[in-house]
């Protein structure tokens, strides 16, 4: 399964490589930058890594990679802070964290959600790194077995979480997800470069940018709804509890955190699948196996722990195809691949070989050790920062709302320096508001936006490659599709059972 | 004065200072190029073009003392970067990193931009195309590939990124030259195509020699469409060696927008020629398996004109130049109007028949059905070009459209069947004031820029939301502007809009 001798030797050379004050400093700087990147709506991990890539040209390859990977790791956590405090996922991977995290804030307990988030993110990050160190090659082999059929099945599996997200009103949940799936078809066709549904508007040719849509649906939609519903006397600062989870509460969640970390790492290791899908699947699985599924969506700590552990677990996973095959599995790892190329490190199986054979084990294992250290730093900085976030969350809404609106606009603008993204953000804000006031869940729209392209592209690619019956000859895709069916009907069966018992 | 007043005054003065800074022109006067030159790149950091631009910037700074800054303007396969350069002042301080793929991008995207809008002044990289095979597959040499293609008679699969892209056009050119037929399957990106090759999903991948780097144990260049064998791959033959007159390559270089003074174009042509002769640049070419080649303004411009025509020919042969969208049966606004009126009539009719009130959910669902119908009518315009191996672009959108319509109809009936509760309490009218303010804010950003309009927006929004502490409002708004200036303008070098009127 794994070659323990080469791992020990690699660790030795890695320790020597990173044993310096500069590397430690890079980790700390990377973690701080990453958290800030995650907190700012619009700055996704990939953009954060891309923005700081030019600054690493003058660093050694190890320090450059350590800095960028620290940013990548901690920005995945940072996204949860705004998801919890203001219902604005700072990164796409934090969407699922809003389901229960923001509910806890509404109940005046953001500390519980923030504490759970930093703890499970850290555990997820460490588990992901350990799996990366021990099982790189077997996981890379699994990733190689994923073809268009399996990607399609995985997309469908991710989509089945709709039944969990919309258990209160299934019909509305399905409509919302179909809406997201339809919206994502706007723009260039995946097989032929012509623009669908642009209605003669050139700005729509490239499709809808995901980040402005996300910010609009969650941040603006929520603000518009709150302003509409608020009574005049409600515009005062909120008194919030500073309570954080106790050790006993963490211990209770150990299974869900570990399971979600593994789910995150495995799905993260499949190129093109990505951490965001992993968070949804982990959330779904956590709810399915929970003793208190009814608490999900109302402020369950498990509901925060599962997506956060999966999201940070996916960082280690995403590095597997990057380092072993040279294939970036996500937008962030695509930028990391660029960083490797800039520093003349060619990823691939040879990277793990000894230096004499043209490999760079000292850099790779140095990177692994740095990731473990970065997780520890992230935990302490996150714990320290939580006190500050709780204070900010308590600020009066008539100050916070205008600032979030201004932040949403700037977050949408600077992606491509285009005002059209600001228009999209505003448009999605209106859509989010309309959905909320008609009691439609917003999350399924985002789910559709995330999974739509993956489902369509891979289904059509599969159809081009041969008849649809080819799916039947693919055991992995069949297993995933069966899991998808089970996952889809499970909440209904459970609800029926509960009704009977009642 | 109390502490709060002092803080308000300080933050407000800082806000005014920022305004002064962003609206002042601090450019240095002097001999060209006295200021840093921006190189706009259409792809993300670390991509091939980006690495080339950064190498050039590095050599320009180290060996010639000229500062060049690489900026990535990604989106629409290069159109965003081209637009950025065309919208910049024609003062010789904005260069566009160009690649051969732009020739097909502007045509396939039906963009208003043409290659005539640019001065192509430095051809720096000559990257031959190659046919890549999997070493462990049955078909792992050029001869075997050719025999198999003849046997399969049009059924052999070739893969690569993008239909209508350079690699697809290379495939078409190769089939023509070799006298064979094959199927093109678009794997969207280079990495996904390489992944497919590692999985042996197809026998041939059209790429570049560099694509096998780091994967030499699994992938191999079967043949290279270069003028001669590459020093790095002495065993890999060229098409010429088999008697085929085929040379195809991807080039990369630099251009200015037309309108830039010719003396600046000449200056840069000369500078880039000197860069191409440095040892650092030669090493960069060797490391990336590129052929050494430099073309100046006149030759490069001529080449672009010739290859633009050739690209049109190849796209036409591939059946990719026709318009894949039929004309609309009726103008868009007429269609929207008819759908809206029909939907309204149906809902009113149902409401009259059942005697139930039309609530907000029903109105929203009706709007969704109307939008879905509009999308459906749009799909009836999509055409699938003959001889191109794709599924209909209408297939999946129609699936979602039908789901939305069916479920929305079900929900409408459910709502009508539901017992009517009391009318919901009307919401606060503040929301409409905020929405109106947002519209003004948007116009304000375009007209007077981000900094002033955001300051005004924040103060007015806080006022609408019942905040009456003026000192707090000014302090918060000024602090927000200061923070966004530091984070975006200084730390991230992102230029926020300064407005049409004030800029």
Image (cartoon, grey):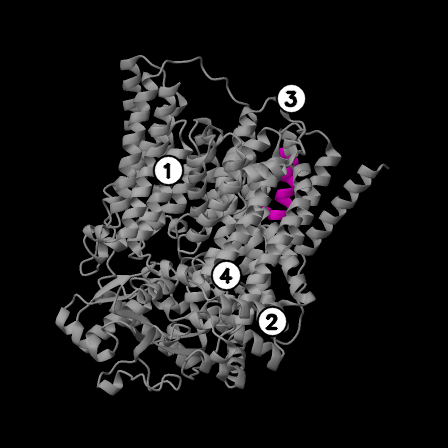
Left or right position of B32 against B344: right
Q: Can residue B337 be spotted in the picture?
A: no
Tell me the element at label 2.
loop
Q: Are marks 4 and 2 in contact (CB under 8 Å)?
A: no
Q: Chain of mark 2?
A: A
The residue to which callout 3 is attached is: A233
Tell me the element at label 4.
helix
Q: How many C-alpha atoms fall within 10 Å of the one at disc 2: few (<14), some, or many (≥20)?
A: few
Whichever of callouts 1 and 2 sits on the residue coming sooner in the sequence is 2
Q: Which quarter of the picture shows residue B267?
A: bottom right
Please tell me whether residue B450 belongs to the stretch shown in magenta: yes
Q: How many C-alpha atoms fall within 10 Å of the one at disc 1: few (<14), some, or many (≥20)?
A: many
Whichever of callouts 3 and 1 sits on the residue coming sooner in the sequence is 1
The residue to which callout 1 is attached is: A177
Distance between the alpha carbons at the discs numbered 3 and 2: 57 Å
Distance between the alpha carbons at the discs numbered 1 and 4: 37 Å
Left or right position of A490 against A391: left
Magenta stretch bounds: B446-461
Q: How many C-alpha atoms fall within 10 Å of the one at disc 4: few (<14), some, or many (≥20)?
A: some
Q: Chain of mark 4?
A: A
The residue to which callout 4 is attached is: A133
Distance between the alpha carbons at the discs numbered 4 and 2: 22 Å
**The label number, if any, that marks residue A60 in the structure image:** 2
Left or right position of A182 against B384: right
Please tell me whether residue A144 belongs to the stretch shown in magenta: no
């Amino acid at each position: 399964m794994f070659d323990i001798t080469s791992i020990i030797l690699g660790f030795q050379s890695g320790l020597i490589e990173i044993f310096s004050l500069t590397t430690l400093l890079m980790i700390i700087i990377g973690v701080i930058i990453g958290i800030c990147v995650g907190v700012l709506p619009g700055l996704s991990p990939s953009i954060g890594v891309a923005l700081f890539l030019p600054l690493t040209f003058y660093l050694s390859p190890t320090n450059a990679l350590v800095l960028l990977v620290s940013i990548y790791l901690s920005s995945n956590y940072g996204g949860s802070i705004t998801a919890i405090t203001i219902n604005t996922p700072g990164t796409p991977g934090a969407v699922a964290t809003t389901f229960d995290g923001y509910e806890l804030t509404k109940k005046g307990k953001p500390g519980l959600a923030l504490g759970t988030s930093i703890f499970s993110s850290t555990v997820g990050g460490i588990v992901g790194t350990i799996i990366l160190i021990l099982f790189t090659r077997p996981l890379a082999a699994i990733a190689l077995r994923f073809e268009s059929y399996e990607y399609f099945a995985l997309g469908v599996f991710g989509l089945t979480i709709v039944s969990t997200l919309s258990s209160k009103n299934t019909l509305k949940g399905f409509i919302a997800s179909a809406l997201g799936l339809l919206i994502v078809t706007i723009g260039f066709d995946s097989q032929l470069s012509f623009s669908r549904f642009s209605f003669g508007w050139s700005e729509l040719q490239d499709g809808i940018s995901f980040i402005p849509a996300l910010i609009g649906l969650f941040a603006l939609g929520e603000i518009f709804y709150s302003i509409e519903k608020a009574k005049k006397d409600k515009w005062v600062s909120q008194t919030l509890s500073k309570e954080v989870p106790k050790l006993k509460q963490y211990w209770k969640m150990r299974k869900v955190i570990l399971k979600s970390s593994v789910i995150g790492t495995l799905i993260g290791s499949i190129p093109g699948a990505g951490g965001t899908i992993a968070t949804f699947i982990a959330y779904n699985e956590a709810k399915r196996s929970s003793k208190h599924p009814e608490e999900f969506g109302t402020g369950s700590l498990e509901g925060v722990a599962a997506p956060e552990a999966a999201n940070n677990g996916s960082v280690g996973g995403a590095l597997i195809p990057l380092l072993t095959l040279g294939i970036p599995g996500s937008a962030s790892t695509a930028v990391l691949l660029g960083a490797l190329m800039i520093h003349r490190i060619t990823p691939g199986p040879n990277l793990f070989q000894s230096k004499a054979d043209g490999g760079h084990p000292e850099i790779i294992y140095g990177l692994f050790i740095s990731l473990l250290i970065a997780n520890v730093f992230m935990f302490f900085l996150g714990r320290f920062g939580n006190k500050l976030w709780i204070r900010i969350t308590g600020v009066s809404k008539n100050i916070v709302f205008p600032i979030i609106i201004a932040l949403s606009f700037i977050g949408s603008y600077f992606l491509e320096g285009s005002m059209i993204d600001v228009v999209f953000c505003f448009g999605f804000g209106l859509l989010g508001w309309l959905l909320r006031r008609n009691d439609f869940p917003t999350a399924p729209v985002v789910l559709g936006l995330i999974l739509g392209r993956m489902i369509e592209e891979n289904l059509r690619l599969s159809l081009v490659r041969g008849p649809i019956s080819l799916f039947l000859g693919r055991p992995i895709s069949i297993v995933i599709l069966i899991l998808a069916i089970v996952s889809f009907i499970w909440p209904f069966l459970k609800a029926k059972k509960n009704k009977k018992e009642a | 004065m109390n502490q709060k007043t002092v803080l308000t005054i300080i933050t407000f003065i800082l806000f005014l200072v920022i305004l002064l800074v962003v609206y002042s022109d601090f450019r240095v006067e002097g001999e060209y190029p006295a200021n840093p030159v921006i190189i706009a790149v259409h792809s993300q950091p670390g991509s091939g073009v980006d690495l080339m631009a950064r190498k050039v910037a590095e050599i320009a700074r180290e060996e010639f003392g000229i500062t060049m800054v690489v900026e990535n303007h990604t989106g629409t396969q290069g159109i965003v970067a081209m637009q950025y350069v065309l919208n910049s002042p024609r003062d010789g301080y904005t260069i566009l990193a160009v690649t051969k793929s732009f020739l097909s991008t502007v045509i396939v995207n039906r963009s208003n931009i043409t290659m005539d809008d640019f001065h192509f002044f430095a051809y720096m990289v000559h990257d031959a195309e190659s046919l890549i095979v999997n070493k462990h597959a049955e078909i792992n040499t050029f001869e075997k590939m050719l025999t198999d293609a003849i046997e399969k008679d049009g059924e052999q699969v070739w893969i690569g990124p993008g239909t209508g892209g350079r690699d697809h056009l290379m495939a078409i050119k190769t089939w023509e030259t070799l006298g064979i037929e094959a199927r093109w399957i678009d794997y969207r990106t280079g990495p996904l195509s390489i992944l497919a090759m590692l999985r042996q999903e197809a026998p041939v991948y059209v790429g570049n020699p560099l694509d096998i780097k780091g994967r030499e144990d699994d992938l191999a260049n079967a043949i290279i469409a270069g003028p001669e064998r590459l020093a790095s791959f002495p065993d890999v033959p060229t098409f010429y060696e088999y008697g085929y007159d085929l040379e195809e390559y991807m080039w990369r270089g630099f251009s200015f927008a037309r309108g830039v003074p010719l003396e600046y174009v000449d200056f840069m042509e000369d500078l880039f020629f000197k860069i191409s002769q440095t040892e650092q640049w030669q090493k960069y070419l060797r490391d990336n398996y590129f052929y050494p080649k430099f073309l100046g303004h006149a030759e490069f411009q001529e080449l672009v004109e010739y290859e633009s025509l050739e690209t049109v020919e190849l796209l036409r042969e591939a059946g990719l130049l026709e318009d894949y969208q039929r004309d609309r049966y009726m103008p868009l606004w007429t269609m929207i109007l008819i759908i809206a009126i029909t939907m309204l009539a149906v809902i009113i009719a149902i409401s009259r028949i059942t005697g139930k009130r039309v609530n907000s959910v029903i109105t929203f669902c009706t709007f969704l059905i109307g939008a879905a119908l509009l999308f459906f009518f749009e799909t009836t315009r999509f055409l699938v070009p003959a001889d191109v191996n794709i599924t209909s672009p209408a297939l999946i959108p129609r699936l979602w459209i039908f789901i939305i319509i069916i479920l929305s109809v079900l929900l409408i009936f459910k709502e009508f069947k539901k017992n009517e509760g009391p009318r919901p309490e009307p919401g606060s009218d503040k929301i409409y004031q905020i929405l109106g303010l947002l519209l003004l804010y948007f116009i304000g950003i375009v007209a007077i820029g981000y900094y002033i309009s955001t300051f005004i927006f924040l103060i007015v929004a806080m006022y609408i939301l019942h905040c009456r502490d003026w000192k707090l409002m000014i302090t918060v708004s000024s602090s927000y502007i200061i923070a966004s200036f530091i984070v975006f303008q200084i730390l991230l070098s992102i230029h926020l809009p300064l407005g049409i009127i004030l800029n």
